[in-house]
Amino acid sequence: MQNVSNWQKHILAVAVAVITVSMLYTNISDLLSTPISASSATLEQSKPAQVNDNFTLSTLPMTGDVNTQFSALSAVQQDVSPKVRNLYADPVKVAKLERYLRRRGSPLADYAEVLVMKADEYGIDYRLVASISIIESNGCRHTYRVNNCWGWGGQEHAATFANLEQGIDTVSRGMGRYYANGATSPYAIEGSYCPPCTTWGAKVSSVMQAIEAS
């Protein structure tokens, strides 16, 4: 009888130990999960409002190395609106523009990032507006009117801009309209932009190629 009692005591002790360990595990799990849930709720509440139907900044990866995040951001840009793309300027494009424009002594070198951002915003080639300025005013060194490096408006109605950034925005938006109508190369734009020019398109294209090689 004594042996049976001891056996029962051992079984009871093991059972108590198992139950105790189980309860500790459950409590620890609850403790660990509570702040995670709270953090998730906080993050959910603090997510930025959607800037369009398909994209929020919270969709970007917050972990991984810089190259991974940069690649992910570049990929996301292909699927978002121009206004979202305008938040980001490709540093490679900016560097190429700035190098070329500085070699030409153009004041637009200081606006390389603006040129790239406006090109993205209006869906045009990032080199186009800078290249036109080289042909029309030697890169803003000899302007038609104040801050008008592009002959915008023609000789009789050349526009005046408050600053170079306003000029870049206006011309980039205008080029966006050409693109929207199917004129997506300097050759196609030439007839409307510079009548009756026959070499303007080739000259602008040549500058664009030089920028790409910078």
Image (cartoon, helix red, strand yellow):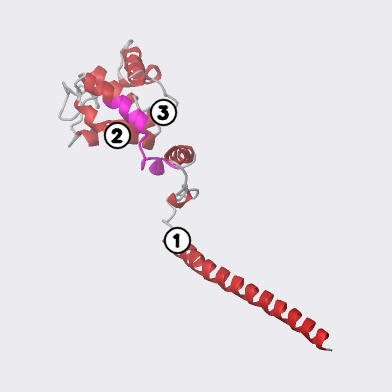
Q: Secondary structure at mark 1?
A: helix
Q: Earlier in the sequence, mark 3 or mark 2?
A: 2
Percent position (x, y) of residue 60?
Answer: 46, 47
Q: Nearer the viewer, mark 3 or mark 1?
A: 1
Q: Are marks 2 and 1 in contact (CB under 8 Å)?
A: no
Relative to 143, does residue 62 appear above or below in the rendering? below
Nearest the camera: 195 or 66? 66
**Residue 113: which disc?**
2
Quarter of the picture containing the C terminus is top left
Amino acid type, mark 3: Tyr
Q: Amino acid at mark 1?
A: Leu
* Marking on residue 43: 1
Q: Nearer the viewer, residue 148 or 3?
A: 3
Residue 138 vs residue 73: left or right?
left
Between marks 3 and 2 in the image, the one whose residue lies nearer the viewer: 2
- Determine the secondary structure under disc 2: helix
Residue 175 appears in the figure: no
Residue 182 at what x, y percent from top left? 45, 26
Q: Mark 2 and mark 1: span between their CA atoms?
A: 32 Å
Which circle marks residue 179 in the picture?
3
Q: Which quadrant of the view contains residue 102?
A: top left
Q: Which residues are magenta?
A: 81-98
Q: Dominant secondary structure of the magenta stretch?
A: helix
Mark before the other along the chain sequence, 2 or 1: 1
**Which residue in the rendered view is the most extreme toward the top?**
198
The type of residue carrying mark 2 is Glu
